[in-house]
Image (tube, rainbow, N blue to C red):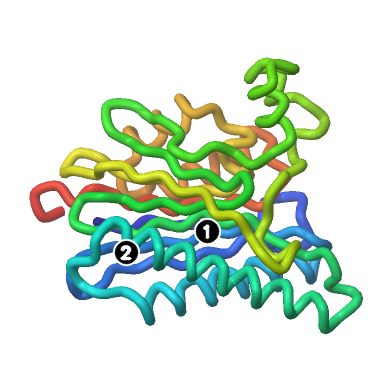
Amino acid sequence: MKILAKTDIGPYRESNQDAFLAGTFETGDTWAVVCDGMGGVSGGQIASKICVEKTYEAIKRGYRDNMTVKAAQNLLNSAICAANSAVFDEAQKDRELSGMGTTVVAVLVIKGVAVIAHVGDSRAYLLSDGISCVTKDHSLVQLMIDTGKITEDEAKKHPDRNIITRAVGILSFVDVEFDIVDVDDDKSLLLCTDGLNGCVEDGDIFGVIKEYGDSSAEKLVEKAIASGGRDNITVVLLVADVQGE
């Protein structure tokens, strides 16, 4: 799969607390990790950087060719748990970093199957004839939607929409959620922080990707900024490599 990626501080933030890494193994299997840090300017940056790096290191160390889906799931789980321990331990060393944490959404695509792991409200979308969100936010407004207290439209403007209910590094343990989807020759994946989906509707995200192709990552960031985005924005597209493109 072809990797298209872009991160941007946005027009209003003092620093970029998002982080990402992505790559392809020699076998052709693809991986990506996206994080959105929290806990003050320095804390958020540190948490997301540690999480991305530790998750990648564990994936690289544990990856094997011809892994089963279950093995890939176990690998992502152990990788994110290792990252959680690293962020948590770092926060214990410095009182100013107390309470720092980060979201994470990570994917390992093995022979046409995407194993997706996430904690928090960074998302993974599946793209084909349309767009569909694969992950389900670990957030207060999602909990309120699930319990019938608000609608999805109300959640978009709710004052507590940025509060997450699960994060990497806050506690000494973390509960990782998984989704598994087929990614054949005409399907692609989008991983992003809420700096994108928080201000650009899903349909508009799909429209940009369909129109701009290899420039989609940059154009999605531009669209988020033009839509008034006040957060950092990170976009990672894993695009189906059709006919050797």
Residue at (45% x, 25% y) in the render: 203
Q: Amino acid at mark 2?
A: Ala
Q: Which residue is mark 1?
A: 34
Q: Are marks 1 and 2 in contact (CB under 8 Å)?
A: no
Image quarter hosting the N terminus: bottom left
Q: Nearer the viewer, residue 225 or 244?
A: 244
Tell me where residue 41 appears, x and y as whole percent.
80, 65
Tell me where residue 198 appears, x and y as whole percent.
63, 36
- In the displayed structure, 150 sits above or below 158; it is above
Residue at (54% x, 69% y) in the render: 52
Name the outermost residue toward the left. Answer: 243
Q: Nearer the viewer, residue 57 or 76?
A: 76
Residue at (40% x, 67% y) in the render: 75
Residue 71's tag is 2
Residue 163 location, quadrant: top right
Tell me where residue 189 appears, x and y as whole percent.
35, 45
Residue at (27% x, 27% y) in the render: 129
Q: CA distance from mark 1 to mark 2?
A: 21 Å
Residue 207 location, quadrant: top left
Q: Is residue 8 visible?
A: no
- In the displayed structure, 92 sits above or below 43; it is below
For label 2, count other residues whose C-alpha is less than 10 Å away and answer few (under 14), some (14-19) or many (20+): some
Q: Amino acid at mark 1?
A: Val
Q: Nearer the viewer, residue 100 or 146?
A: 146
Q: Secondary structure at mark 1?
A: strand
Does 5 sit left or right of 13 as displayed? left
